[in-house]
Image (cartoon, helix red, strand yellow):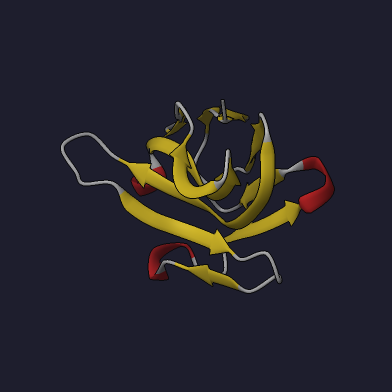
Amino acid sequence: QVQLVESGGGLVQPGGSLRLSCTASGRIFSINTMAWYRQAPGQQRELVARATSDGTTNYADPVKGRFTISRDNAKKTVYLQMSNLKPDDTAVYYCNAEIAAMGSWGFYWGQGTQVTVSS
């Protein structure tokens, strides 16, 4: 069984920083894209950033220049370094990964971690 476990959320003041981590575990053969999504209250879940297995990264416009996604493939872990945080960044952040396990590819989600930006 494949699991994604996130950590690193919390309460931070505007202008502050946080780093989120997400580690995949289970009988994993390969991992392709790993990504971070977020969902604010009353809003749809939206893509924040993604990183492919070859290192290509993409960012949503609202976070460009402030957030950095990175991966440690040996640890099956993806990170999201968030800087200059704004109140609009407040949301539950979810990890997502495309994983080959038990003979097939599938998309898996973590349980989510709350990020609150407030003074």
Residue 54 falls left or right of residue 10: right
Residue 66 x/y as whole percent: 57, 61
Q: Quadrant of residue 18?
A: top right
Q: Residue at x 62, y 49 (%)?
A: 80
Residue 90 x/y as whole percent: 38, 39
Say whether residue 33 is visible: yes
On screen, 64 above or below 26?
A: below
Residue 62 falls left or right of residue 103: left
Q: Quadrant of residue 92?
A: top left
**Observer-nearest residue: 62 or 110?**
110
Residue 61 falls left or right of residue 54: left
Residue 96 x/y as whole percent: 48, 45
Say whether residue 86 is visible: no
On screen, 17 above or below 27?
A: below
The quarter of the image holding the C terminus is top left
Residue 58 x/y as whole percent: 52, 71
